[in-house]
Structure formats: structure tokens, C-alpha cells
Amino acid sequence: MQLIQSLPKAELHLHIEGTLEPELMFALAQRNGVTLPYPSVEALRAAYDFDDLQSFLDLYYQGADVLRTEQDFYDLTWAYLQRCVEDNVVHVEIFFDPQTHTDRGIAFDTVVSGIHRALADGQQQLGISGYLILCFLRHLSEESAFATLAEAMAYRDKIIGIGLDSSELGHPPSKFERVFAEARSAGFKVVAHAGEEGPPEYIWEALDKLKVARIDHGVRCQEDMALVDELEQRQVPLTVCPLSNLKLKVVDDLAEHNLRWLLERGLLVTINADDPAYFGGYLGDNYRACAEALALTDEQLRQLAANGFKASFLPESEKARWL
Ligand code: ADE
Ligand code: ZN
């Protein structure tokens, strides 16, 4: 376990709104005069008992309502970066969901500026490099995604990529084919959640229609061996989130998780935390839980950490520092 701590790590699948710890949620609620529907931190934490992705998302969107000012987004991101130091996480590629905020009247600039200012401080004061990936909420319309992309155009220097998250079932990647084409032609890197709860067909669509550089989750690829072969041959990274999969009942038991199988099959698999404040573990916790439940070897742990850098959007010269 000392090895896990000492390995420099990259985090590629992390929703910044999913790092909102109950204590900070209550502090921000008080600062902003928001009344939470829970009497205490303990009561809120006790509600983190999910049946599936949607039951989590309902609470996650409700929690985000306490985020109102640029300073709130700064404080949220800064708290996460400080937590990264403990786990020896040296590079992060952070998702944010602007529509969750702009739809309740918070300016796009408030969100991006607060997160970006914390990332700049993280680089300067903590030596952690950080990129920002904007996710479209897939339960909303294509039109809303286009409007969000239009807002992002003025922030090309602060946002490296575009992703796709929220309720997967019933919202296939193909719904966003046109807006992803526009995002790519504007120079954004593109990624998408696929194959978390959704079927292998959604992973094929993310590859073929959205032309993504990485698949977020992707664990259901195993149901289609031609897809597994494709992911292996093209070395398309999967950003797997083991404790998230356990909490959202994608798997019943971590010992049954296919992370090790995928790794041994030659896929470019990475370990990530997804929404650590809700799922009971940051990146180090995810590594430790998998090492134990799946009996990962030291070599496999080194490989997983190295994969995080290989699959990142860092320039090759920067990747080489960590490989
Ligand atoms: N938004 C935050 N976490 C998510 C997840 N695991 N899947 C889809 N959307 C999300
Ligand atoms: Zn996610």
C-alpha cells in the first residue's frame, strides 16, 4: 500500500461538483443563505445510499445549488487540489457541468473563472497541473448543448476539452453528434461517458459518431468482444471509476469488477474517483480498494498509474516526466 501512496498519479475522470463534501456544502449554504433539506452533515451523508446513477444524480444536482459565487467555485476546486497532495496526484483533468449552474442563473464566467483561478494556484503553489473539460448534460437538448458550446468559445484558452455526462440510458451519444463535430472543429479534445449503465452500442457511437479520444467508464464493453478488440487495438483509454461503480450498483461487489480483466486483456485502463465526496473515496482510496479486492500486483499498480499519464492530454514532453 506504500507503493500506491508513492506512485505519482493522474486523475482523468473527476467531476468537480462531485467533490463537494457535506461540510463544505453546509458552509456554503450558510454563506449564501441557502436552506438545505437536511438538518445536519450526518443526515446528508446518510442519504448517500444510491440504487443507480439517477438516484445519485438527483442528490448531486440538488447539492450543487449551494454554489453561487466565483469564490464558491474557487473554494470547491481548491479543497479538491489540497486533497490531491495527500494522494500524490500530480495532474488532473477536471470535468465541470456548466448547464447545472447557468440554468439556475449563475453566469458561465463565474463558474469557469473560479475553477480556473484555483487550478492556476494549484499549479503555482502545489505543483499540480490541471486542465478543464466542459461536460454537456445529456438529459438536456442538443440545442442547449450548442448554446453552451457557444459560451465556451470565448474560453478556448481555459477549457481543453468537451465531454458528455448525466443520465445515460435513453440519451445515446448520437443525440450529440453534430455539436461534438462543431466542438472538434473548434479544436477541443472530446471525451464521453459511455458504457457505465448504457449498452456497448453507446460505446460504439461515442467512438464512431463523436470520435472521442477517451471513453469515460466503458466497463460494459465486455459484453461485446469485437468492441473489446477495437478498444485494445486502437488503445482508446477507458477512465474507469471502481468505487463509483460499486456505489451506483454497476457491480455488486468490487471483487467482480472487470478492471483487472480489461487491463490483462491489453486495454489502456485508468483508475479514477468520479464523484469522491458521494462515493466514499478519493483516487488513493480507489487504488487501494482495487488492489485488495482484485489482488493487483505491484506491476499492475505501476501500469495503472502510468496509464493515467499516457491517456492524459498532457503534451508528450510532459508525459515523459512521469513515465
Ligand atoms: N455526473 C457526475 N457523475 C456522473 C457519472 N458517474 N455518470 C454520469 N454523469 C455523471
Ligand atoms: Zn463521471
Image (cartoon, rainbow, N blue to C red):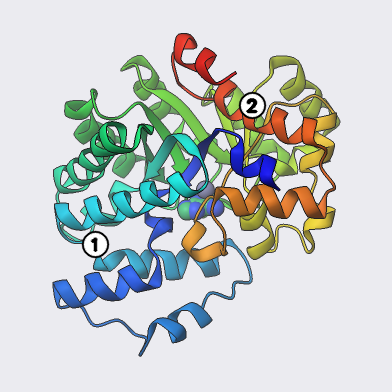
Q: Earlier in the sequence, mark 1 or mark 2?
A: 1
* Residue 56 in view, yes or no: yes
The amino acid on which the numbered mark 2 sits, given as a three-letter code, is: Asn
Residue drawn at x 44%, y 80% is 44
Q: Relative to the observer, which residue lies in front, 104 or 244?
A: 244
* Residue 198 in view, yes or no: no
| Residue 174 percent across, percent down from the top left | 53, 34
53 lies above or below 314: below
238 lies above or below 209: below
Residue 65, image quadrant: bottom left
Side of 147 relative to 60 (left or right)? left
Residue 40, image quadrant: bottom left
Side of 32 relative to 270 (left or right)? left
Q: Confirm if mark 2 falls within 8 A of ligand 2.
A: no
Residue annotated with mark 1: 67
| Residue 305 percent across, percent down from the top left | 63, 32
Residue annotated with mark 2: 307
Residue drawn at x 34%, y 16% is 187
28 lies above or below 170: below
